[in-house]
Image (cartoon, rainbow, N blue to C red):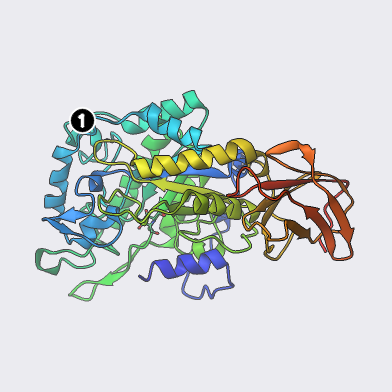
Amino acid sequence: MLYFIPLLLASTLQPISTAASPATPATHVRHAPNMQWWRQARFGMFIHWGLYALPAGVWQGKHVPGIGEWIMNNAHIPRQQYAKLASHFDPVNFSASTWVHIAKAAGMKYIVITAMHHDGFCMFPTKATHYNIMDATPWHKDPLAALDKACHRQGLRFCTYYSVENWHSRYQLPKSWNHGHPAYFPTRFAVGGAAPYLKYMTTQLGELIRHYHPAVIWFDNSVITPWKTPSGRQVSGWTQADAQTIWNFVCKNDPSVIINNRLDKWSHFKGYGDYHTPEQQIPSQGISTPWETCMTINSTWGYVSWNHDWKSSATLIHHLIHCASGGGNFLLNVGPTAQGVIPAPEVIRLRAIGQWLKINGQAIYGSHRSPFNKPLPFGYATQKSGKLFLEVTHWPKNNRILVPIHNAIVRAYLLAKPAIPLKTASLKSGAIVHLPATAADMIAPVVVLDIAGPIKPN
Ligand code: FHN
């Protein structure tokens, strides 16, 4: 899919020709002043929740391949037919405090929920359209307000996801109507649709900022493409000027909000926005600017009843460590059901991550990227002043690890057993740390080296 190619390029940050993109506006690059909390947080919950949780990957009795939140596109569901789902959306088991507690117990410090995904259904009350959870469903509640309140109560930051592409809006057209079986992605603006759609966006973004004051606005899919009408009229797609308009609107209405790099597809090439957003993969040695990998626990963002492609808790803990060792955040996704319940396999894994962080969180929260510019055979490293944390994801057979530094080691110990010193020896090639035969936590025990002075990698 064309859209994903830029994302992959973005995550490797290779110099890429920008010949195709217009002159880059100077005001686009910004690192919001309050990114400190975000950099220290390291770990957040992504929540993909919407009408798509009702079909849950099944349409007209058949499994629809692909990610659950794309069912409208993948099953070519006409807009009015898909919109009928709203009258059945009644998440009677939704509990904002439970969801936030699950995130908190997992060690997550912020949540990002889909306020509006590509299907155009608004999970918040809005004056811009009746096609929203308060007006169009029998539930008549505002889950974003409840989650915002629960986050404040439980000490997490509340953030919102907002899709630029909108498969329901009359101002955006599907890629093709396909004789009543529309393919939506990537959409096109209707003739004269760009200006009213920008107005629609600023109305809703203004509501999100005023009503929920999100700490982050997580834009997505700004891939509305240009096209030519049968009479030969050229209709532009989403332009960098459109992105700048929205960027300026958000920054003016809330200068402290953090904005990711997906408002403008060109920004993927140039790193504009407050941080990069590699998806479903972790840049091996991290990225020099702020970044956050987003990832699913199975292989769909929105709930799919038959998707059991679960990653193990150990794999997810290793991914979290890998992100932190590259100086990045890990935004791990849950896809709640139409009844408002986070699936048990996701809760079980999140609880395991929380247990690991309870013992080893000091190595992750507020840590800085590894001082080493190449992978370590035994695992990863993070650091704080005077301390080097070594997350051992591959326990060595000889129970020894060679750490490529030439610092004097004041003390070495396992974070899980700080009172028991580990034996070390200094070699030309670095420091040997002798590990016990086994460790209580064999997923990723953390060795701490108290170091005098700045770390000096070999
Ligand atoms: O198309 C979306 C997808 O549904 C999901 O929301 C991911 C999450 O980052 N973003 C887009 C794909 O890059």
Which quarter holds ligand 1? bottom left
Q: Relative to residue 33, is residue 264 drawn left or right?
A: left
The quarter of the picture where residue 380 lies is bottom right
Query: In the figure, 259 relative to 428: above or below?
Result: above
429 or 364, which is in the foreground? 429
Q: How many marks?
A: 1
Residue at numbered disc 1? 139
- Residue 346 seen anywhere in this rendered image of the structure: yes
Q: Relative to residue 360, is residue 124 drawn left or right?
A: left
SS under mark 1: loop
Query: In the figure, 180 relative to 297: above or below?
Result: below
**Residue 442: x, y in percent?**
60, 49
Q: Relative to residue 108, is residue 162 drawn left or right?
A: left
Query: In the figure, 140 relative to 7: above or below?
Result: above
- Residue 210 seen anywhere in this rendered image of the structure: no
Q: Quadrant of the N terminus?
A: bottom left
Ligand 1 within 8 Å of the CB at mark 1 = no
The quarter of the picture where residue 32 lies is top right
Residue drawn at 45 percent across, 56 percent down: 262
